[in-house]
Amino acid sequence: MLPHQLTWTYASDTGQRYTVGLFHSIREGHLMVYCNQKVVLIDFKVFDTRSYPLFLDDELFHIDIERKNGKFFYGFRMDKEVDTPRNKARRLLEQKHWKQTLVFVLLLALAVTAVTIVGRSLKEETTDPEARAELIRYHGKPTECRVEGIYQHDDQTTVRYSFKINDKSYSGREVLPPLAQPILPSGLPLREGDQFAARYVGDRPGWNAIQFDHPTTEQIKSYRQLALEQQAQQHPEQSLPFIECLLDIAYAQNGLSGYAAFIFQTATATENPFANELTYKRLVRSLDFQNARQRQCL
């Protein structure tokens, strides 16, 4: 089961834009929250309702996780009730009616300006990354891309990829949250040469995005081979047909996260919060896995 992944965007009164992202592994309970590609929270075993505070500038927000009827629901809300300096100022402002009128007029002017900008963006190129992301998400065409380079810095990991449309090459970049090594939310490793699905705008292929949660068929085979080699190295007493059978069960029960557990079966939770020694042991020792192993592999 792939982890849940969500993003929210908040623009402060000063014009600063914040992109808050959340990764939540449903099976393992691992939770990671980042803001503008910087990790601000890591929590483990999040299986029930939780709420986490987050300050952006002088505004207090809450990231809410609610479990209801076996499903998880997520929210990102501003807290206007708690006694913060910003909320005190807001309440004083609300007491003066003429200031409310001024704010309304200003917001109306901003709304008209925003509508004008959006209308123009349909005719001319925009540099707003959020507008591009919306266009790619809802109107993009599918293709396949290849990871050409991975560059790690102190505060982020940048991935460069390329693809071809009508024999012409295009490229793109994607930023991942900083970790000890390049790891996808599924727990799988990320390396140069890996292949994934991508989307691009038909008349502007330069507007594109990689889809890390949709590896190609060949890439899935590569993950399986990595899992097989790691299992064979750690358990030399097991035959290759037996290991193949174990991997069939892992993929059937956990999808790509099953391969990730086998690949990182010796890793710590710090090295890989999504797939590690603990997730591997939980998988292979689970009752479902053991029953399938008895039926299919012995």
Image (tube, rainbow, N blue to C red):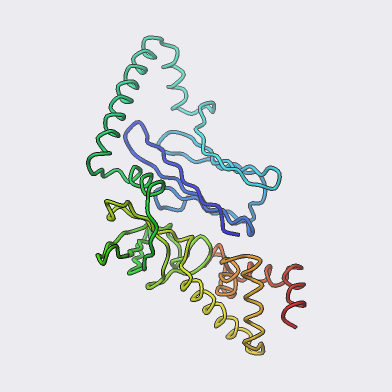
In the depicted structure, whether residue 258 falls above or below residue 59: below
Q: In which quadrant of the rendered view does residue 20 lie?
A: top left
In the depicted structure, whether residue 190 falls above or below residue 124: below
> Horizontal and vertical percent for residue 117?
27, 33
> Horizontal and vertical percent for residue 76?
51, 38
Task: Tell me which residue sits at (66%, 44%) in the image.
Answer: 67
> Horizontal and vertical percent for residue 12?
37, 34
Which is more toward the observer, 84 or 97?
Answer: 97
Task: Tell me which residue sits at (44%, 27%) in the image.
Answer: 86
Task: Tell me which residue sits at (63%, 67%) in the image.
Answer: 279
Apparent side of residue 234 relative to residue 210 in the rendered image (left or right): right
Apparent side of residue 131 relative to residue 88 in the rendered image (left or right): left
Which is more toward the observer, 157 or 145?
Answer: 145
> Quadrant of the image for the N terminus?
bottom right
Apparent side of residue 189 relative to residue 250 in the rendered image (left or right): left
In the depicted structure, whether residue 178 falls above or below residue 15: below
- Count the labels in the image: 0
> Horizontal and vertical percent for residue 274?
56, 63
> Quadrant of the image for the C terminus?
bottom right
